[in-house]
Image (cartoon, rainbow, N blue to C red):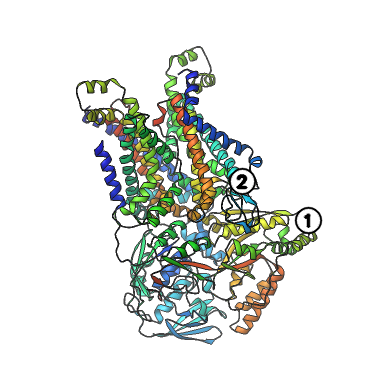
Amino acid sequence: MRGITLAALALFGLLAGGVQAQPRPVVVVQSGEAATLDWHMHCDKNAHEPDRQIFDTLLRRDLKTLKLEGNLAESWRLLNETTWQFKLRRGIKFHNGDPLDAAAVKYSIERMLNPKQGAPGRTSIATIDHVDVVDPLTVNVVTSKPFPLLPVRMSPGHCGTVGIVPPKYIEQVGDAGFAVKPVGTGPYKLVEWVKDERLVLEANRDYHRGAPAIERLVFRPVPELTTRVAALLSGQADLVSDVPPDQVAKIKASGVARTEVSTLGGFVIMVKMTNYLMPGPWQDVRVRRAINYAIDMDTIIKTVLEGYGQVLGVPLEREAFGFNPAMKWWGYDPERAKALLREAGYANGFEMTLHAPNRRYMNDIEVMQAMAAMLGKVGIKATVQVWEQSVYTTRWRKRELLPAYMTAWGGAGLFDGDLLVNSLHSKSALAIHRNEALDKILEDAQGTNDPDKRRALYFKAQEVIFEDAPIIKAYQQAHIFGISNRLDWKPWIDNMLFLYDARLK
Amino acid sequence: MPSGRRTRALIGSPGAGLGLAAVALVALCALSPGLLAPADPNEQRLLARFTPPIARTADGEFTVLGTDQLGRDILSRVIHGARTSVLIGMSAVLLAGSVGTSLGLTAGIRGGVADQLIMRLADMQFAFPFILLAITIIGVLGPSIRNIILVVGLSSWATYARVVRAETLAVRERTYVDAARSLGMSLPRIVVRHILPNVSASLIVVATFGVAGAILTEAGLSFLGLGVPLAIPSWGGMLAEGRQFVDTRYWLALSPGVALFVTVMAINLIGDALRDALDPYLQTRGTVDRF
Amino acid sequence: MRPLCYVPLVLGYLSRRLAWAVVLLFGITLAVFLVVHLSGDPTALYVGPEGTRQDYEIVRAALGFDRPLAEQYGRFLVRAVQGDFGRSLRHQQPTLPLVLTRFPATLKLALAAMALAVAVALPLGILSALRRNSPLDTVAMTLALAGQCMPTFWLGILLILVFAVQLRWVPVYGGEGLASLALPALTLGVWAMARTARITRSSMLEVLPQDFLRTARAKGIAERHVILRHALRNGAIPIVTAIGLELGNLLGGAVITEAVFAYPGVGRLAVEAVVNKDVPLLQAVVFSVAASLILLNGVIDVLYMLLDPRVRLA
């Protein structure tokens, strides 16, 4: 008997002991696991974060001015309305030694364009017609019509941007091989990837901007938020993104970690309403304005988001090209909301469903619940319906999240009025609102390379959006990062982790 | 065992007494939450978020158990949450119990192909990982109390079927059933008069643990984001929502946690007492489904 | 009891079980297939957010979801028989290796949880039975009852906060060797531990008053031997049943524990497959888990027979 008890104790001791202290690499914990590391084959934040270290793009943005600057390309210019020329930097090599040349750029762009490849970001660059190799360090990208966004699509971004991949290597290992063992020109190279467990990267000594300061990075998927924060506080992890506001005080007080808040370039979050896919009061513009009047977004941001956000109105990043800072949105005025509802013939209110994603954006469920309660105060009985992620995406795509659903754009480095196309052009896959005047303006803006014309058109688009009120007050969320005290790093403006500048204190 | 002794065994056990008292309280909350709760469980007061227990909120109201992340009154939510837990626990068990009992009876009485078919179906249910069934069904049909009941019910009927079948087989062989049959008693009557009363003791015990299991299951589903809809307060939902505040604002998860713990414990205590009183051999069978 | 005599019986029994297992697995794959397709095909998840209708159709055809359901299932079956469960939609890799590489981790976790549970529960249950109604009994059984009343995720989070963040005895996740298993195994094992302790106690209580023990004692056999050799052996059947059932639960049910502790096992793969409607991956996961549960049940039945020849092999 005593023997068994002792054995049990011994076993427990064994289990509990054995923690080893050893110098360890910088550990980034993520909410989920990448499915593929092939830059062209995903639109997934968790895959983009490691890929951002492994791959590189022709251009990049200056962190302070937001201006585009050369990266793999040292210069670029518009030859004519439909031809962009890029001159590559000399001497850059892929991690396996293959040279970065014009052929690799041509291959990368055309690979993404090829419908058979099935790249999810293909549509974003579909205006590109073909790519010509001029000489080993010069490429011409020819578009079928003016494509003002082309340079942006050649700079880092989450989805629909062109990462440069090695043609010979992909031919050798095939798409499936490349997905698990990618080779790029980025500051880190892949060492090993044990799915669901760890993804290990090692400094690329030959990086064209010089070797990064940190020798090893480990990305680790940890689905549970409480566990991610616990890992940071126990000193096991160094970097956690998407920290909710209520965890900030705890992290700050821990003495082992701190938080960094990035207020620039965050998600633009909005609740879209339909005006044609489902019959109901929301088809009346007065009702949509009334709904906007009913929402006290300032209070929601102050309380539910604990101040980590900013009311926008027009669903465009403040940093975006074409954003009109003078634009005002419908204010908070419940009395006017009620008056408008009476005027529209809904004095007794009505019922509506608000569809919400499950923890996709900062405290999204709580924001939606607060909105529903505010709508209740003007007589609109709103019910919040939360959907599990895959179902949300599927229904979203089928335009079944009616009459209103929460979504977000931006936060991915695009910084352009073109974002309005994705969210509000009626032909966009995810739009549920139709306004032909708006469609026309947005199409015109896509058809010219002239920045002044584009800006004017986007300003006009914002006026139309304001009058039509197809969304409930948009807001931009801040992004909160938890960072261990030994790590010196500041968030990059696209809020995607880029750790080239990081160093250990 | 004579029924007088059963009753005494049940009431006499101190654990069961405590359990009954706790369950009575929960039942009271479930029956008339509106009468007991001090406030509307869904009423938000954004400016009074995170008020600790036994304190005044920023807008001057007294709260016993504090407020949550939207300024809702936690005591009211716990009281209303009792209804959700009881509803899910009871209905899931009723569903699983009635499906399982009918199938178990059919298998036990008819034997042959029907028996084989039903028992293989039961095997299938045992071998089908519960969580996959749960996510898929709720993912497809949407999260609602009805769907949770469906999932929990569907994933536990086999236990009842097995117990009932085994008991039926045993009863079938007994002489009084033979006698009834030879007297020309119809099959349904034999079932109602002789077989059901004999299996009911085991069933009641299995069902008691089933209620406790279903309540815990609801909590687990909430953790995975598959719990009841937001507008309906539930202990599992509150516990899941409160988990990230466990070390900073303990009161969000403490009250629903204690309510859930005490209720499940009470039901288990009653189940233990019932088992001791009714069927001492039943304890070795798998009774509660869980993650 | 001479186990060897039962070998032919066992073999015949096993072949019948095997035939049923095949039918069962077939049924389960069909069920998974139907349930997943109830919600429509998963194409939408594999087209980028800006994709057009045309992109949608291209992807749909590439994934084979444009074929009739019967044909899709037929193709699946034909390949499955050859041991090919198709490629994961999300990982774009063969599914079976994905599952099999994670299986050892889950098995390790389940076994560690079970070992921990048995190591604590068995002595506790026996001691409680021997000292019935003593303070030890009361405390142990109250704790055991309490262990069955706590939601798994809750226990896991509390353990992390106390042992990994406050005390820093163990890592939150990962780590080397047994350290990585301590908290997840405890979290997963508590339920089984509680259950096994209670069952051990009650089986022992049933066996202890019986005559053969009195005889054994009268023969002068040491009390320790009486308990461990004679009493425990006779009370073993319900305990083995319970352990078997629990091990099945642990294997198929580590989902929440794996999520809380970021543990790289089959459970997480399953959730991921469901969330991404990755049908081939889901099929492979369900198939392997179901197959191992069926195997486990077979092993337990054979164990019964060895423990107690009177058990009828039906």
The 10 Å Cα crowd at callout 2, few under 14, some 14 to 19, many 20 or more, is many
Q: Chain of mark 1?
A: A
Image coordinates for residue C229, horizontal then vertical, percent: 24, 30
Q: Quadrant of residue A281?
A: bottom right
Label 2 sits on a secondary structure element that is helix
Q: Say if A487 sits above or below B80 in the image.
A: below
Give the quarter of the figure containing the C terminus of chain A: bottom left
Give the quarter of the figure containing the N terminus of chain A: top left
Residue where numbered disc 1 is placed: A347
Q: Chain of mark 2?
A: B
Q: Nearest the camera: B160 or B58?
A: B58
The 10 Å Cα crowd at callout 1, few under 14, some 14 to 19, many 20 or more, is some
Label drawn at residue A481? none
Residue where numbered disc 2 is placed: B76
Q: Which residue is the extreme one toward the left?
A: C220
Does any portion of residue C19 appear in the rendered image? no
Q: Nearest the camera: C283 or B12?
A: B12
Disc 2 residue type (three-letter): Ser
- In the image, taking residue C17 as reference, residue C271 lies left or right, namely right
- In the image, taking residue C194 as reference, residue A300 lies left or right, namely right
Q: How many numbered discs, if any?
A: 2
Q: Say if C96 sits above or below B169 in the image.
A: below
State how far apart marks 2 and 1 are (Cα).
31 Å
Image coordinates for residue B162, horizontal then vertical, percent: 44, 31
Label 1 sits on a secondary structure element that is loop
Q: Nearest the camera: C111 or C74?
A: C111
Image coordinates for residue A231, horizontal then vertical, percent: 40, 60
Image coordinates for residue B53, horizontal then vertical, percent: 57, 50
Q: Say if A62 sits above or below C76 in the image.
A: below
